[in-house]
Image: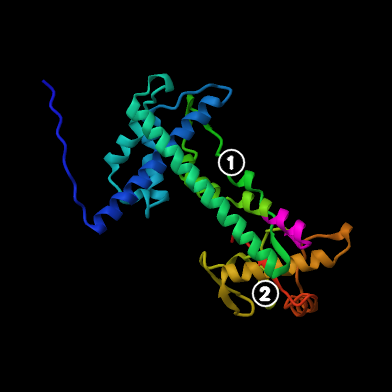
């Protein structure tokens, strides 16, 4: 005789938050492993990635992301990787079907909220500014899954390719909805007679807005900017926004055949600074930076 036991949990607020974070990280690990299996099977070799290979990558994943994946139990992550059953649509029970419909409704709500936020934000930018500059990001290239890495010593095996860690980043990029927002912004700007300019994103957060010095060492951390040449300090996002705006203004004023992202030097940088305060219609110019 098989008996089932049910336990009622009454976690505190801190315990509930910890459980939510653990569930989110385990879901991210599970989805990344599933994506790796799918990409390997779609390869021309039709290779099957099994649990043993992915379990062996756990140590590298935990070392790569110690703040998220590295803080949970190793055995619980192994259990998450070992459970890949899928129920076909024709075999779903009523409870399962109701759960599927509930999840679909939640995804629909999130999608509507994202669109609503994009429309309102784009409308506010178009109403307040005559010229908007943003980084010309290749979103599709940024969200590409890493390709399988065949093991040269084992023809039917693959080496760790970081798919689990990349899956979390791809999910965050997709959830932000950059492409949808930029499409809405361009449409509203065109309807209102505003200008939207895309500029080359390279070194926008590494170039000093004061002296024009560009170096990797100018970004000691993700958020901090400290120029090693002149000592200028600011938030990295602020520096990137200023450089994007100046590059957009220079590209806007340049002939169509020479519209390239400028490299500010000396007097040219100062000239751009004086023209970026306001527009000819009494409106402020805005810069839009969707990635630092």
* Residue 288 vertical position relative to residue 152 in the rendered view, above or below: below
In the rendered structure, find residue 55 and report the number of the disc placed on it: none
In the picture, measured across the screen, residue 39 lies left or right of residue 183, that is left
Q: Residues within 10 Å of mark 1 (few under 14, many from 20)?
A: few
Q: Identify the element where label 2 is drawn.
A: loop
Residue at point 80%, 64% (across, down)? 251
Q: Quadrant of the N terminus?
A: top left
Kindly tell me whether residue 42 is visible in this rendering.
yes
Q: Which residue is mark 1?
A: 144
Q: Observer-nearest residue: 239 or 196?
A: 196
Q: Position of residue 221 (x, y in %)?
A: 51, 66
**Is residue 119 found left or right of 161 in the rendered image?**
right
Residue sitting at x 37%, y 36%:
56
Specify start and end residues of the magenta stretch as a single range. Answer: 185-198
Which coloring applies here? rainbow
Say if 109 sits above or below 235 in the image.
Answer: above
Which residue in the structure is indicated by mark 2?
209
Q: Seen in the image, is 111 located left or right of residue 133?
A: left
Q: Position of residue 208 (x, y in %)?
A: 65, 73
The foreground one among 17 and 202 is 17
Distance Cα–Cα, label 1 vs label 2: 32 Å
**Placement of the C terminus among the 4 image quadrants:** bottom right
Q: State the residue at coordinates (48%, 27%).
A: 153
Q: Residue at x 86, y 65 (%)?
A: 254
Verify whether residue 162 appears in magenta. no
Q: Is residue 288 visible?
A: no
Q: Is residue 195 magenta?
A: yes
| Crowding near the residue tagged with mark 2, few <14, some 14–19, many ≥20 C-alpha atoms within 10 Å | many
Q: Secondary structure at mark 1?
A: loop
The answer to which quarter of the image holds residue 32 is top left
Residue 36 x/y as whole percent:
48, 34
Q: How many marks?
A: 2
């Amino acid at each position: 005789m098989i008996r089932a036991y049910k336990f009622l949990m009454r976690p505190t607020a801190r315990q509930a938050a910890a459980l939510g974070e653990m569930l989110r990280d385990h879901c991210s690990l599970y989805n990344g492993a599933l994506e790796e299996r799918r990409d390997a099977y779609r390869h021309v070799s039709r290779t099957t990635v099994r649990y043993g290979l992915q379990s062996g990558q756990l140590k590298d994943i935990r070392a790569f992301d110690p703040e998220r994946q590295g803080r949970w139990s190793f055995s619980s992550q192994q259990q998450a990787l070992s459970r890949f059953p899928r129920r076909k649509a024709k075999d779903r029970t009523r409870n399962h079907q109701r759960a599927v419909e509930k999840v679909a409704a939640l995804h629909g709500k999130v999608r509507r909220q994202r669109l609503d936020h994009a429309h309102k934000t784009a409308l506010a930018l178009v109403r307040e500014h005559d010229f908007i500059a943003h980084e010309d990001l290749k979103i599709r290239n940024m969200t590409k899954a890493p390709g399988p890495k065949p093991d040269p010593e084992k023809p039917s095996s693959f080496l760790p390719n970081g798919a689990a860690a990349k899956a979390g980043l791809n999910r965050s990029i997709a959830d932000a909805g950059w492409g949808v927002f930029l499409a809405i912004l361009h449409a509203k700007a065109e309807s209102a007679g505003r200008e939207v300019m895309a500029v080359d994103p390279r070194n926008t957060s590494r170039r000093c807005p004061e002296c024009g010095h560009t170096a990797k060492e100018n970004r000691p951390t993700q958020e901090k900017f400290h120029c090693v040449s002149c000592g200028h300090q600011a938030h990295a996002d602020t520096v990137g926004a200023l450089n994007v705006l100046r590059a957009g203004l220079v590209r806007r004023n340049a002939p169509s055949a020479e519209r390239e992202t400028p490299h500010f030097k000396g007097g040219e940088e100062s000239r751009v600074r004086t023209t970026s305060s306001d527009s000819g219609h009494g409106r402020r110019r805005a810069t839009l930076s969707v990635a630092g």
